[in-house]
Image (tube, rainbow, N blue to C red):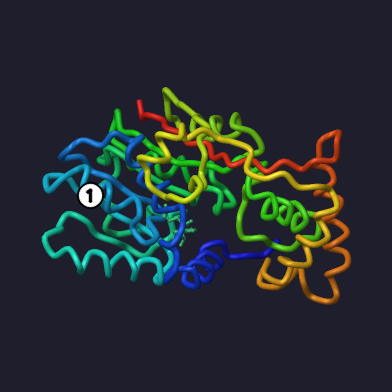
């Protein structure tokens, strides 16, 4: 399965950068910062910072005596973050760097900062990494003792089209640029955080998508922020879902004539396997947020 994850991510997110903020990510990122309970003066490393949806709320939370560093591979996403920074000339305690978060040790500016961060955040990006356990382990070395890491993984029954393609891609040897199957269960996630040496690990399921009609954090929290049934499908829906989406997956790879029929057959098989005994395929709006502390 030859691929270069960071090149894939750069291409994908450069393309999405202009409209990325028109999404539930704005509210979800704020929620992550709220869960982290930042204090004035703290030092934060925001990994896969994208357009700064976590970074800027973190800047507000740590105040002018704190610092925040954002790292992302996508120049398009970082350009959006820099644009936000330019519009706030009084903010001087944040800096963005283009680099892979799977290779932090080669980022010069972080060399002197191992063991110094109070908080590391990585929102909506851990499942984009093929080897998340090793990544978290490297990140943990940048925390000071008592520092916390907060990150998240999606429930395997959420965003069902994507995870079905991931399973199909595995069977066909076609790279799909996300790796949610590393976390089939919340225990897999907990294990990954523990593998990095983090203690007091708490993994909590919450809803990810916006609630009907609003993307406001207060409304969402008032609605309970609990994971819920998002949509119910039937086994037969697989056909039309495949037809509507195959050309947009793996850079069109699964939609190509030579592979399309085989991919469709597998898509239908995999889809049918996730149906319950009554033939219902249940999509769940759920993401697991995990927090761990460096001893
Ligand atoms: C879904 S966005 C999340 C952005 C931000 N954390 C948020 O909550 O809005 C995923 C981000 O991960 C970044 N990314 C993916 N793989 C990466 C890698 N290996 N190194 C650095 N950034 C990466 C992408 O460029 C993109 O900006």
**Side of 104 where 274 appears, left or right:** right
Quadrant including the N terminus: bottom right
Image side of residue 76 versus residue 168, left or right? left
- The answer to which quarter of the image holds residue 88 is bottom left
What residue is rendered at 27% in x and 45% in y? 44
Image coordinates of residue 284 in percent, x first then y, are: 64, 40
Is label 1's Cβ within 8 Å of ligand 1? Answer: no
Please name the residue that numbered disc 1 is placed on: 59
**Residue 92 vertical placement versus 224 (above, below):** below
Measuring 55% from the left and 52% from the top, which residue is drawn there? 129
Q: How many marks?
A: 1
Quadrant where the C terminus is found in the figure:
top left
Quadrant in the rendering for residue 176: bottom right
Describe the element under mark 1 as helix, strand or loop: helix
The image quarter containing residue 71 is: bottom left
Asked whether, in this view, residue 269 is left or right of residue 34, the answer is right
Question: Which residue is nearer to you in this view: 38 or 195?
Answer: 38
The residue shown at (88%, 59%) is 265
How far from the left and from the top, in percent, is residue 233? 76, 47
Q: Is residue 9 above or below residue 209?
A: below
Name the quadrant where ligand 1 sits.
bottom left
Picture coordinates of residue 67 (x, y %)?
20, 49
Check the image and report above or below for 171 versus 38.
below
Kindly give the residue lying farthest to the bottom in the view shown.
257
Residue at 34% from the left image edge and 50% from the top image edge: 54
- Residue 93: x and y, percent? 17, 54
């Amino acid at each position: 399965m030859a691929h270069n994850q960071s090149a894939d991510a750069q291409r994908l997110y450069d393309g999405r950068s202009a409209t990325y903020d028109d999404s539930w990510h704005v509210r979800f990122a704020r929620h992550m910062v709220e869960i982290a309970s930042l204090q004035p003066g703290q030092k934060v490393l925001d990994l896969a910072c994208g357009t700064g949806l976590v970074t800027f709320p973190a800047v507000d939370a740590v105040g002018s005596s704190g610092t925040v560093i954002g790292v992302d591979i996508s120049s398009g996403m970082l350009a959006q973050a820099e644009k936000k920074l330019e519009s706030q000339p009084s903010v001087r305690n944040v800096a963005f760097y283009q680099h892979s978060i799977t290779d932090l040790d080669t980022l010069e500016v972080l060399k002197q900062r191992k063991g110094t961060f109070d908080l590391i955040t990585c929102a909506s990006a851990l499942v984009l990494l093929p080897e998340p356990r090793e990544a978290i382990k490297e990140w943990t070395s940048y925390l000071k003792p008592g520092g916390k890491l907060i990150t998240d993984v999606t429930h395997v029954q959420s965003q069902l089209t994507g995870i079905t393609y991931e399973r199909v891609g595995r069977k066909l040897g076609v790279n799909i640029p996300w790796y949610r199957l590393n976390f089939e269960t919340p225990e897999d996630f907990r294990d990954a955080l523990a593998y990095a040496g983090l203690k007091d690990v708490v993994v909590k399921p919450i809803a990810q998508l916006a609630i009907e009609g609003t993307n406001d954090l207060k409304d969402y929290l008032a609605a309970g922020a609990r994971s819920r049934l998002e949509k119910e499908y039937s086994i037969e829906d697989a056909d039309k879902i495949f037809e509507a989406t195959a050309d947009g997956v793996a850079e069109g790879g699964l939609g190509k004539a030579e592979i399309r029929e085989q991919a469709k057959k597998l898509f239908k098989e995999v889809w049918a396997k996730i149906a319950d005994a009554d033939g219902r395929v249940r999509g769940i709006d759920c993401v697991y947020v995990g927090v761990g502390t460096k001893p």
